[in-house]
Amino acid sequence: MDKRTFLKTSGLLGLGLLGAATAPWLTSCASNNGAELPPNWMWFHANMERTDEEWENILLTLKSAGITGILIGGGRPMLSRIIPMADKHGMDVHAWMWTLNRSGDEEALKHPDWYAVSRDGNSCFDVRPYVNYYQWVCPSKEEVYQHILKQVTELCGIPGLKGVHLDYVRYSDVILPEALQPVYNLVQDKEYPEFDFCYCATCREKFKKTSGIDIQTVEDPTALLEWRQYRYDSVTRLVNRLSKEVHQKNKLITAAVFPYPELARTICRQSWDEWHLDAVFPMIYQNFYNKPVEWVKYAVQKGITDTRGKVPLFAGLYLPELSGEDLKKAIDYSLEAGASGVAVFDFGSFSEAHQEAFKTALLERDTGK
């Protein structure tokens, strides 16, 4: 099951689910290392069954709407096929990869000790939180890092690829977004043991070595700030090591992250304002948090403030929960707040109304309205 299937299972699909604000709408912005980035992006799930003609029509549709950045999964087979087609249209392709959620990873499954362990002692290898495809590996393990690095290195070797885009680069949600909790008959008013990761032997030993504290003797681990920081740092260290390797291969590295760092730290131990990235793509899916479209502006402002404006930020928008009119508002709110552009999830929900919203936003900025 992929991310889209999870959202559909959650019922939210069925509900209908650092640049300046004055930057030109259809011009590139500079990444954190000076390379040019398109202003507008789309996430794609790989689909090898589409014909070349179908892909050509999709790319033309995106380009006419002003979307020239593609974040696509599928590894070398899909990327090697799509990159030459995208190049013809002046479009950038980045490899979208799942990072710490390794569902279906045949090599990882050979190593049960790689998987994250909850506070109540269950491993994601066989007890998966929330949904069956949540199989999280532990960021503290060197073997895990080397396994992920191997995938990143292989992606960087694909001719024409512009960059690597990390997703699921965090711990499993310790607290689900507000709108998702009722779907699982949950009230997560605190951090419950079955959703609190990671307490594997590696994490316990490394934490004790650095802090002198045996986390298993702490009455309430959720209240221990040092333990919380250890897990922020574990993910941050992994990302920054990957970043160094990617840059040495002259590629860009970006990540899909939770709406803004303060919220991300609270619900999934993701301290992304400390990451060495070329750009960030916060997934500002307002309906997940029972927020109105206007919340997009607030979240973008928070993200830019928390990162001190040091990295381009592209506001991630969730098409299934946005009408064409609301998408236009979300785009405007994002740019007013200082986003370098937007990224939308995903093509399967890219209706004619959404396409018109992009074209209207483009026209308004071209004419100065």
Image (tube, helix red, strand yellow):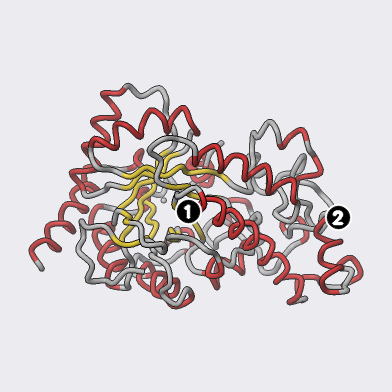
Q: Which mark is residue 253?
A: 1
Amino acid carrying label 2: it is Ala
- Residue positioned 64% across, 41% down in the render: 102
Mark 1 closeness class: few <14, some 14–19, many ≥20 residues within 10 Å: many
| Image height of 48 relative to 209, above or below | above
Q: Are marks 2 and 1 in contact (CB under 8 Å)?
A: no
Tell me which label, 2 or 1, sits earlier in the chain: 2
Amino acid carrying label 1: it is Ile
> Residue 185 in the image: x percent, y percent?
64, 54
> Residue 212 in the image: x percent, y percent?
88, 74
Disc 2 on helix, strand or loop? helix
- Residue positioned 49% across, 47% down in the render: 249
Furthest-right residue in this view: 217
- Residue positioned 78% across, 37% down in the render: 111
Q: Quadrant of the C terminus?
A: bottom left
> Residue 326 in the image: x percent, y percent?
27, 59
Furthest-left residue in this view: 367
| Image height of 148 relative to 110, above or below | below
Residue position for label 2 = 201
Disc 1 on helix, strand or loop? strand
| Image height of 365 relative to 100, above or below | below
